[in-house]
Image (cartoon, rainbow, N blue to C red):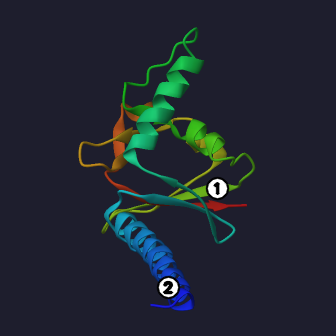
Amino acid sequence: MTFNRRIVIGILVLVLVVGGAFLFEHVIKVQGSRKGILVPVVQNSKTIAYLDAGTIRQLGQQERELSQGQSNSNSNNEVSLSFVLGSAGIIDYQCIEVGGVGDSQDFKLSPQDIEVIALSSNSNSTFAMVNKAEGNRVMIKEVAKFNVAN
């Protein structure tokens, strides 16, 4: 086999591997979004972050570490929605639209409403939205999307 032919075959293999990796990533994102495992945070029609149950647990731990001196009633697998939005760099918004998997009701939350909302990870790699002011009432059992409106 000539040297030029080896180079062409090597480049083709690299293109196929890189293309396959991008395709695999896209398929996983789409499947995760449909099942509520990978939740996109969309602002101005652009996805700015993805959340999953592991991220929610990690952010909850960070929030508890930051507020050790203050009274924080979040359990081990909860984090406040305001902390999650701040971690994603979202500070200026008019409302947040939160949707669930399947036939779940969508909620529009103002910045004042968000202060009493927490996200809690579930055992099936999804997370729920709960209202702390109403005694941890589950608003959405499996969150599927966040849409930020400016």
- Return the x and y of residue 119 as percentages of the image width and height: 43, 41
- Return the x and y of residue 126 as percentages of the image width and height: 33, 50
Name the secondary structure under disc 2.
Answer: helix
- Return the x and y of residue 17 as percentages of the image width and height: 45, 75
Q: Which mark is residue 6?
A: 2
Badge 2 crowding class, 10 Å Cα cut-off, few under 14, some 14 to 19, many 20 or more, is: few
Q: Which mark is residue 4?
A: none
- Residue lying at 65% horizontally and 45% vertically, measured from the top left: 111
- Residue lying at 59% horizontally and 39% vertically, measured from the top left: 82
Question: In the rendered image, which residue does mark 1 sit on?
Answer: 95
Q: Is residue 149 rendered to the left or right of residue 146? A: right
- Return the x and y of residue 20 as percentages of the image width and height: 43, 77
Q: Is residue 97 rendered to the left or right of residue 78? A: right
Kindly check if marks 2 and 1 are in contact, taking CB atoms under 8 A apart as contact: no
Residue 137 visible in the displayed image: yes
- Between the residue at mark 2 and the residue at mark 1, the CA separation in whole angstroms equals 57 Å
Mark found first going from the N terminus, 2 or 1 = 2
54 in relation to 8, above or below = above
What's under tag 2, amino acid-wise? Answer: Arg
Name the secondary structure under disc 1.
Answer: strand
